[in-house]
Image: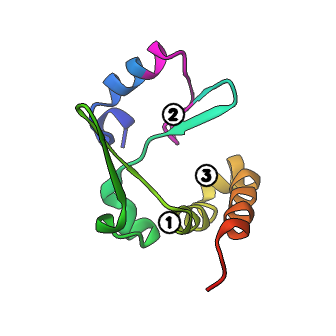
Amino acid sequence: MPPELSIHNWNDIVEIMKSMEYSLIDLHEHEFSKEGFSVEFGIIDTLPFFAGVPLHELEKHEDGDAVYYVLNPNQYLKVYETSSKDSYRCNKNNHKDLRKIDFLKSIIPDD
């Protein structure tokens, strides 16, 4: 599905990111980059099915009219472990995913 149909207000997001001097570097991953920072957009409704992260467990933030959610390290770990198995990501950036998984495991305390 094209990004403009899968992500709410995709065209607006692209324009806002460009206005902040971010460059779209990967349309498939909805990823923007600027000065070593990466910002990616995803479809929140798919998170429970995709990575087993329940939406009610996400940390919600509001800033003016903007509403966004932040994942904790355990939730990020679930996402990256699942993402690392995706054929597109394996071929394109699996090494980055594996480094992120190793990092997340290093900062998550053992239970």
Question: Viewer-proximal residue, 56 or 51?
Answer: 56
Range shown magenta: 17-32
The amino acid sitting under disc 1 is Gln
Judge from the rendering whether residue 74 lies leftward or rightward of residue 69; answer left or right: right
Q: Image quarter for residue 21?
A: top right
In terms of sequence position, does the residue under pointer 3 or pointer 1 come before the other?
A: 1
Residue 18, magenta (yes or no): yes
Q: Image quarter for residue 17?
A: top left
Residue located at (61% from left, 67% from top): 81
Q: Give the residue pinned by disc 2.
A: 27
Residue located at (46% from left, 68% from top): 51
In terms of sequence position, does the residue under pointer 3 or pointer 2 come before the other?
A: 2
In terms of sequence position, does the residue under pointer 2 or pointer 1 come before the other?
A: 2
Q: Give the residue pinned by disc 1.
A: 75
Q: Residues within 10 Å of mark 1 (few under 14, many from 20)?
A: some
Mark 3 element type: helix
